Amino acid sequence: GHLCTILAAAESAPAQASELAQQLAKWNSAPQEVATILKPLLQLIMKDSDLSMEIVSEDSPAWMLSLLQVLAEDLWPKAAVGEVDLDSELIVKQAFKLLDTSSVPWLNADEVEVEASIQVWHSFAETLHAALRASDESTLESSRRSPMFAHPEKRSRRSQDRWHLTGERLREATMVNLLFQLLVQKLLDCMRLPEIPEDEEALELLQHARQSVEAALRPWAALLTNADTWIAELWNPLQEVQNTLAAMGENDEGFMSVEVSRDVETVIWFFGAFCSCLPKDQVAAAEAASHAVSALIPQIHQLDAALPPWKALLWSSV
């Protein structure tokens, strides 16, 4: 009845339908009921549902940003861990396309700020991290509460209003693991230095974008507790840099191409940024970082093979 009418209208006016979807997504007191309406609505608004990483600018208009931001603050993370029935892959694809188009000036017809598209991923991780904290605090509070006293009503209600996510449930969420892996790959691609490093305007824009990435990495780093697969995925690009530099030592050409210089610089920057975000209790991640650094050090002198000004840029990222 009414849902069919709404969906028919959404198909002909997706931008206006996205405003309705935002209002529904903010109705967090009944997530399961909201998801029943929101799932088919999002499928019409966002269309495709595969995880293709192709850049198609027209599929990520500016109005998509507001919808993705609202979803990242509640329902999308819940869908990613299997607590509500939404098409998480569909949302992921649009979030990645928005990041793609906002980081490539000639594709960014709607002039969406890349920092805003990165904020979507920041919010997604922060929502998960806040739910973990709420679960931990609730467990701690329960263990300290004396059975002789009743629950303070306000505290109990406040606790119930917050989403609680256990560490075990997060570790079982394969979609979140996949998202982290894809996000690392995407950021390494989007956050590369411009091909012409003397372009001061492009460098300044990239610097602002990288600052947003570094802020977004903090809640992601806090989610890594005992997640060995996440840690292994993070160090893979650094292993590739090590192999690239080692191969250069066996190559007679004697110089590093611009493309290789861009790739190496981005990985070294990203690795340093992520390590600086690791909480002190992330022992496994710290050990993995130490091992990765020790493996890279014997090859680090190969940075001298880069052409100017890449040589200086590479050493400044170490």
Image: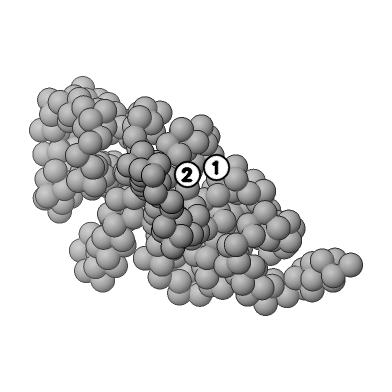
Q: Earlier in the sequence, mark 1 or mark 2?
A: 1
Give the residue type that dot 2 points to: Leu
Packing grade of label 2 (10 A; few <14, some 14-19, many >=20) is many
Q: Position of residue 177 (x, y in %)?
A: 47, 37
- Outermost right residue: 1
Q: Quadrant of residue 22?
A: bottom right
Give the image location of residue 165, x and y in percent.
47, 44
Q: Residues within 10 Å of mark 1 (few under 14, many from 20)?
A: many
Q: Identify the residue at image location x=50%, y=36%.
A: 169
Write the residue at 89% across / 67% down.
1
Residue 8, horizontal then vertical, whole percent: 82, 69
Label 2: element kind: loop
- Secondary structure at badge 1 equals loop
| Residue 308 visible in this rendered orientation of the protein | no
- Residue lying at 56% horizontally and 73% vertically, measured from the top left: 63
Residue 128 drawn above or below residue 6: above
Pointer 1 and pointer 2: residues touching (CB < 8 Å)? Answer: yes
Identify residue for label 1: 81
Instruction: Please identify the quadrant where the C terminus is shown.
Output: top left
Query: Where in the figure is residue 236, as x and y percent of width and height?
Result: 34, 31
Relative height, residue 156 to residue 50 (above, below): below
Q: How many marks?
A: 2
Which residue position holds label 2?
A: 165
Task: Please indicate, yes or no, whether residue 70 appears anywhere in the rendered image.
Answer: yes
Amino acid at pointer 1: Val
